[in-house]
Amino acid sequence: MKRMNGNTIPPGKLHRILDAIRMAPSSSGLQPFEVFVISNRELKNKIQPIAFNQPQIGQASHVLVFAIWDAYTEQRINDYFLLNNQERNIDDTLTDVTRKRIIKNFSQQTEQEHVQHASRQSAIALGFGLVAAAVEKVDSTPMEGFHAAQLDELLGFQEKHLKSDCILALGYRDEENDWALNLKKVRRPRQALFTFIE
């Protein structure tokens, strides 16, 4: 979708989309990302040039910025297990072996490997958001076309130890001005995309 009409998503629909993102599966349950939900027009207008002036940014009801952890630190992993154990009302000793194993595994990886892993987890949640938006009849445009360092600076991600990973524009299609509206969707044929191994 190349154009949106600026109409606002009803709160209930937005809540259900965000909840789908929140409930998406994540490796070890860590959810190594945060999602910044931006409806402020001034801020969206500042993001637009950073995102190669894609018009959906300024026209969207909400712009979601998925920001991943810059590293899997021991503190972040410990914080997750503290929450997990409190929510499930279980003793910390029951998860200590798993917690320590995860900390050890990530301690043996590079920061780049951490970022790559976190990005894949963010992509899973993004996918759930896209499906939820379709169910809610809200149009959506996922975007990787932006200057990450500039977006990180604008949103203060360095101080939060985060890195921008993806943008999701949510809103409603501008049916009068979207040149792609009536174009046939083109995807590779099934036989080129799927390999069945029986």
Image: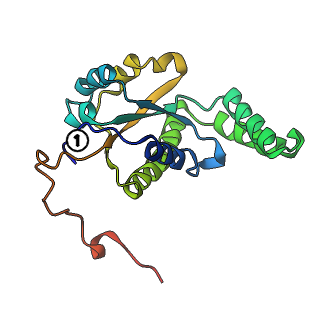
The percent coordinates of residue 137 (x first, y second) are 35, 55
Helix, strand or loop under label 1: loop
Residue 112: where, in percent of width, then height?
49, 33
Determine whether 151 is above or below 127 in the image. above
Q: Please, which colouring scheme is shown?
A: rainbow
Left or right placement of residue 25 versus residue 40 in this view: right
Determine which residue is flagged by label 1.
4
Q: Quadrant of residue 11?
A: top left
Task: Judge left or right: residue 180 versus residue 127.
Answer: left
* Label 1 Cα neighbours within 10 Å, binned few <14 / some 14-19 / many ≥20: many
Question: Compared with residue 115, is residue 120 higher up or lower down, i.e. above or below?
Answer: below
Whether residue 38 is situated above or below residue 177 in the rendered picture: above
What residue is rendered at 74% in x and 32% in y? 78
Left or right of residue 185, residue 150 in this image: right
The answer to whether 152 appears left or right of 192 in the picture is right
Q: Position of residue 81 (x, y in %)?
A: 75, 38
- Numbered disc total: 1
Tell me the amino acid under the disc marked 1. Answer: Met
x 61%, y 32%: residue: 72
| Residue 187 % position (x, y) | 23, 64
Q: Quadrant of residue 196?
A: bottom left
48 is higher (above) or lower (below) than 194: above
Residue sitting nearer the eye, 102 or 22? 22
140 or 116, nearer to the observer: 140
Q: Outermost residue toward the bottom?
A: 198
Of residues 26 and 168, the one nearer the viewer is 168
